[in-house]
Amino acid sequence: MGKNQTGYFGEFGGRYSPEILTEALEELESTYQKLKKSKKFQKELTYYLQNYVGRPSPLTFAERLTKHWGGARVWLKREDLNHTGAHKINNAIGQALLARHMGKKRIIAETGAGQHGLATATVGAMFGLETVIYMGAVDVERQNLNAKKIEMLGAKILPVTAGEATLKEATSEAMRDWALNVKTTHYIVGSAIGPHPFPTIVKDFQSVIGKETKTQFKKINKKLPNAIVACVGGGSNAIGMFDGFIKDKQVKIYGAEAGGLGANPGEHSATITYGKTGFLHGTKTLIIQDEFGQIVPAHSVSAGLDYPGVGPEHAYLAKLGRVDYRKVSDEQALESFLEISRVEGIIPALETAHAFYIARSIAKELGKKKDIVICLSGRGDKDVTEVLRLLGEKSK
Ligand SMILES: *Cc1c(COP(=O)(O)O)cnc(C)c1O
């Protein structure tokens, strides 16, 4: 375990990964630092974001929802309209470009719900890179459509059967692959987690969300919004949205985490509400663990929030009190999923439905003439079958 002084957010973050990864992480960091300052790289990135992803994504005024909730004016940052239907591709494109610049011809990724696997398989195809996706065997079953799409795009899925056979195990397996194949392979981490420099790289590639939001909002309203809201799994869409506003003290910032079925270990993924400091996947952060420090399997109705850790910067922002993180239960997320579909004509991802749920009470707290922006991290097509199943169960 090597400890590196850079890459900390207060006491959280850092690099706590096996020695075998040190060289790869250092190569990644120095390449990234160079490219970040390169006008040519930034131009290339912008080119793909505009012409392949479809950026900038719109900032939509939600007229009906504003009336329906009866509080602050509601705005939606439409990451659901990106190619592949979520924010994940912002980061996948950026890191695939990094891989190309490092001369690596093979990319690997972990995936839970399959959204990051899908984004990675997509950019792998587009850049002509050999692509391998690690996915828990349970998730391959649960998220079969995404698994099939990943294969259709020419990527290979390696199902992981260890432990709970979900996201945590898939991540561990991807790290193992990377350690063995660093010379040829780049590991595209899918959220603002992992050892330094990943949380910073992922944040930088997702920060386009907050930057665009700020410009778009200011252009229409000649001021800043009063509040911004995003859902938090590993925390990449949230940190991408928050980053542009953290220094604007007058903007209130809220994160929604998965409260699941209840407060007992194993029933939720509310890392910030219930977690304790520990180490997971090479970073120091808040983690859901039992009294012996064993990591407890996470639960959420939305597979994308189902992770027992959280990006270290969120642990730090929570500790500072800069961001107010609130938990939302499976039931409440389901309620918002239906509400947004029916009131606004947008079927949101179940992950995003968590953000909508807290946004409703925040909009009421703020009152009329104030403005709230919600990061609509992804569309909900992938969740329709699961929602129907849950509604069927409830009506029994
Ligand atoms: C993956 C995913 C999330 C959760 O991941 P973060 O890294 O926390 O953003 C949220 N919403 C959607 C639509 C997702 O696909």
Image: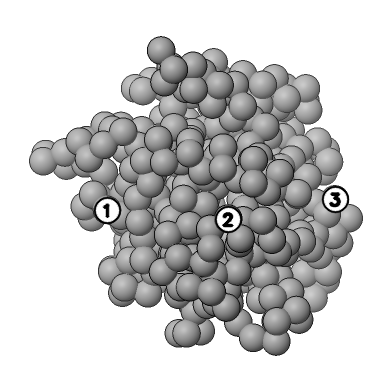
List the residue tagged with mark 2: 68
Where disc 2 sits, the SS reads: helix
Identify residue type, mark 1. Thr
Disc 3 vs disc 1: Cβ atoms closer than 8 Å? no
- Crowding at dot 1, Cα within 10 Å, few <14 / some 14-19 / many 20+, comes out as some
32 to the left or right of 229:
right
Considering only order in the chain, which callout, 1 or 3, is on the residue closer to the N terminus? 3
Which residue shows up at 49% across the image and 22% down it?
Answer: 391
Q: Amino acid at mark 3?
A: Tyr
Taking 140 as reference, is 332 above or below it?
Answer: below
- Is residue 20 depicted above or below 241 in this figure? above
Q: Mark 3, residues whose alpha carbon is within 10 Å: few (<14), some, or many (≥20)?
A: some
Q: Earlier in the sequence, mark 2 or mark 3?
A: 3
> Where does the image place residue 358, in percent across and percent down from the top left?
44, 55
Structure colour scheme: one colour
CB of mark 1 near ligand 1 (< 8 Å): no
Q: Ligand 1 closer than 8 Å to the CB at disc 2?
A: no
Residue designated by label 3: 52
How far from the left and from the top, in percent, is residue 178? 53, 39
Q: Residue at x 36, y 60 (%)?
A: 325
Q: Give me the C-alpha separation between circle 2 and circle 3.
A: 35 Å
The residue wearing badge 1 is 273
Mark 2 or mark 1, which has the lower sequence index?
2
* Whole-percent x, y for residue 144 in the image: 61, 18
Residue in the image at 54% along x and 15% along y: 141
